[in-house]
Amino acid sequence: MNPSHGRPARGFWGDLMKKRLTPYLFLAGPLALYFIWVIYPIFRTIVASFTRWDGMTRPRFVGWENFVRLFNDRYFILSLLNNFKWMIGFVILSIPLGLLFAMLMDQKYPGHRIYKSLVYLPMALSFVVIGQIWSWVLEPAGGIVNTFFRWIGLESLAKPWLSDPKIVTYSLIWAALWRQIPYAMVLFLAGLQSVDKEHVEAAIVDGANAFQRFWYVILPELRPAMVIAVTVNIIDSLRAFDIVFVMTRGGPYYSSSVMANYMYIQAFHNYRMGYGAAIAVIQFLITFGFILVYVLNVLKREERI
Amino acid sequence: MRKLLVLVLSVMVLLVFAKERIVINSYMSDPAPRKALAELVEMFQQKYPEYEVVVNTFAHEDFKVLLRTWLASPKGTADVVTWFAGERMRYFAEMGLIVPVEEVFEGSKWEDYFPEAFKSTCSYKDKIYFIPQSWYWWGVYYRKSVFEKLGIKEPKTWDEFLQVCETLKRNGIVPITIGTKFPWTAAGWFDILNLRINGLDYHIALTAGEVPYTDPKLMKVFEYWRQLIDRGYLLPNHTAYEWQEAATFLFRGQAGMYYMGQFIKDVAPAEVKDDLDFFRFPIIDPNVALYEETPIDGFMIPANAPNKKGAIVFLRFIASKEAQEKFAKDLGRLAANVEVAPPDEHARKGLDMILASAGVAQFYDRDTNPEMAEVGMNAFIEFMQNPNRIGDILKRLEAERKRIYGK
């Protein structure tokens, strides 16, 4: 025994245990849970999507029927398009605004902690609460938004935010952004911690103005945070449900419906489990595509490091 | 020895006080009916101290979704559930998810408790599955003081009805309030217009999926409905409101009329309650007899109920005169039990209206298949917002009907 190490000698098996099996033993627990609660339900959903099933009697295999039907279902197509509106809204609004707030909050000025907390506050609320609050804010007759517009004499801007099929989805996206923007801000604030202060100082010495410092020094170094923020926002937009469910239930007549919400109606309200499962499968495939892009991006960066 | 004695004694005490549990899942989430049910349960427990009753209350819309999960799960938790008579009950009876409740009538018969006319609505294949508790009527609700102030009399015909709307509108009052965030309120309008224009047999055939939605006779319903929409008689932005929120426009005097079930009184503030009155929906075609909507609410027993014996005892109590009287009195509804008189003047008026009718329907989403009801009711909302699309809307409904009923 080598006294300087103070460890017991290991034979072949000990070596194998340590190097090969131990990591897997540690992984086994989480993997088992992951399999039971994630992989298996996904598998079951895929199987269910090829059946006609009311959730009670025996499912009947119907092949691709549900999927064919889906792409002839105008309300599903509408829900899909609405999800894309959510995605665009989340990316083009929550990213730049989140970044802007992050830049503002990263400064040290009197009371900066208070401002940070105020902007961060919506993050502490659940979507259900946010949906309820915005239902009241956007209420057409006595809601604060319309009351305000009438008060300043801009009657024409007082719109039926939640009952006009043309604008209802945008109203919902706005309510969701109220929480999503601070979320992006937090991601960027974390990213800003890793920006090398020396680079910024060097840029100041070189005479770069504020915009140049931001554009040429800070922004490139925020790239990892940016990738995370964009992907997380896209995934969040695809799983939008709570706000829609609380504020409009997808109405009026499905005009604000999103995939998750339409799936819920079909599966649990109309008792079409197979059809609902088919919607879930499509939603899964789209989300999975974005997650794949993200994971590949992360892997590539890890390789570089 | 002492220890053993203590043990024996405590077991005996436990046995004496151990109560049998009856679990009730209820959709009575509005404060008034919720309180009435809680008091009924209290009465039951005093009468049958050997039972302990647990009531789980769920919001109405959530209950509709959850019920199926409870009924379908292999191990049941609820012994009694609230529900609606008619198609919506039969749907579960057909799948064997609820059990017959005929033991309730041991030593007596249906007719000792309930009207003969209710029997078929509460039965599936000649077996009774449903114990009715209360029923109510739909009517056009208004505030007496508002009508008096404007010198308006209850309209009897469609033309008079339109005139009332016009008077209200001229006086800056929204003639008709409605909240369609949950679309069933629109189904009320569809039902009553169809009943007034095409009659009960046609309406029943339609809700049973036997009449195409593209039938020209049905088009007439939407033509009448349209008159109200085109003249701007309906509450603007009605899709933003739930039915209770729409009712507040009536309570505050900002809206004039509300076609609604009697349960509107459950949510009326005390100072408005006595000012509320209703009239029978106006006659459109004098050649069509008068039919009304009278949904029946009650209870059933899931097939997976852990304590079916207790459930039967509870339902026997619910069917009894004292229980039915208490519930009807608290809420101003009509008791299903034939021995209970209408609890007040208002209910008497409702009962008289129904007794003078030629027949009754339950309600669109109670008479028709749930899936068809969902697309149908959303289609009505789409029509209310885009009356010009009606041709296209009905074509789509017809495609759905064919898919759902397979004929």
Image: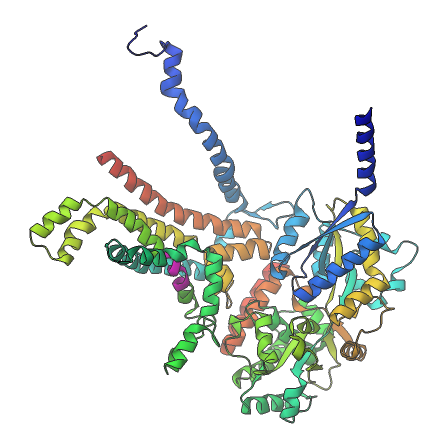
Q: Which residues are magenta?
A: A173-180
Seen in the image, is A256 located left or right of residue B36? left
Instruction: Name which quarter of the figure residue B350 lies in.
Output: bottom right
Task: Say above or below: B141 vs A177.
Answer: below
> Between A151 and B247, which is closer to the camera in this rendering?
A151
The residue drawn where x is 30% and y is 40% is: A296
Which coloring applies here?
A: rainbow
Q: In the image, B126: left or right of B154?
A: right
Residue B147: horizontal and vertical position, in percent? 65, 89
Q: Is residue A177 magenta?
A: yes
Whether A207 is drawn above or below B159: the answer is: above
Q: Quadrant of the C terminus of chain B?
A: bottom right
Magenta run includes residue B56 = no
Residue B323 in view (yes/no): yes
- Which quadrant of the structure image shows residue B256? bottom right
Q: Is residue B209 visible?
A: no
